[in-house]
Image (cartoon, rainbow, N blue to C red):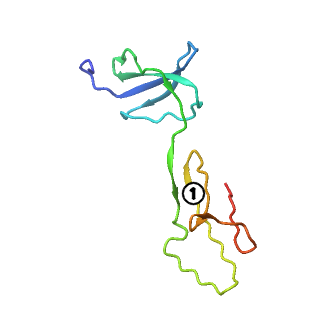
């Protein structure tokens, strides 16, 4: 309820578990906001206050939230090789770089016919990240 005056924004504050202090995070106009630079495995409570020409509303608090790393399923970034024609003669070296994205960082293994690729003078797999 806006009390009869248009809401002009929202104030977002955060409080770390064990602290009495509320920290100003942002003043926004949107109804959603992504809070950055939080410490992983820390617990936070957030509160939001609506703002209009009469001032701030009473705060509404969230329940405590434990910050965890956002997970992203692994995927290959094939933009660099998508529909790229490679012509090589027998005995030529070919280097194919395929970034693997995801969080937490994926563990990658390369196989052929369900067997791990063996590192040889002809086959070299390198993890660069």
Q: Does residue 54 sit above or below 68 in this rendering?
A: above
Query: Residue 111: where, in percent of width, then height?
Result: 60, 64
Task: Work out which quarter of the rendered image holds the C terminus and state it.
Answer: bottom right
Find numbered disc 1 in the image and state the secondary structure of the residue it sits on.
Answer: strand
Q: Does residue 75 sit above or below 9 in this rendering?
A: below
Which sits in the foreground, 44 or 9?
Answer: 44
Q: How many marks?
A: 1
Query: Residue 65: where, in percent of width, then height?
Result: 48, 25
Which sits in the foreground, 77 or 121?
Answer: 121
Q: Is residue 55 left or right of residue 93?
A: left
Task: Work out which quarter of the rendered image holds the N terminus and state it.
Answer: top left
Q: Does residue 47 sit above or below 69 in this rendering?
A: above
Extreme residue toward the right, this view = 121
> Where is mark 1, residue-wise?
100
Looking at the image, which residue is at 31% across and 26% down?
A: 7
Which sits in the foreground, 51 or 41?
Answer: 41
Extreme residue toward the left, this view = 4
Q: Does residue 84 sit above or below 62 in this rendering?
A: below
Extreme residue toward the top, this view = 20
How crowded pointer 1 is (Cα within 10 Å; few <14, some 14-19, many 20+) is rated as: some
Looking at the image, which residue is at 60% across and 48% down?
A: 105
Which sits in the foreground, 79 or 102?
Answer: 102
Q: Quadrant location of residue 98? A: bottom right
């Amino acid at each position: 309820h806006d009390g009869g005056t248009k809401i002009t924004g929202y104030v977002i504050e955060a409080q770390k578990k064990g602290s009495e202090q509320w920290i100003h995070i942002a003043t926004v106009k949107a109804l959603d906001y992504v809070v950055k630079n939080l410490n992983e495995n820390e617990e936070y409570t957030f509160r939001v206050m609506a703002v209009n020409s009469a001032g701030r509303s009473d705060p509404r608090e969230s329940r405590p939230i434990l910050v965890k790393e956002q997970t992203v399923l692994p995927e290959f970034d094939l933009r660099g090789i998508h529909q790229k024609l490679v012509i090589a003669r027998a005995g030529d070296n070919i280097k194919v770089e395929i970034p693997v994205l995801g969080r937490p960082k994926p563990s990658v293994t390369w196989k052929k016919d369900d067997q791990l690729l063996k590192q040889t003078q002809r086959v070299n797999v390198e993890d660069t990240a």
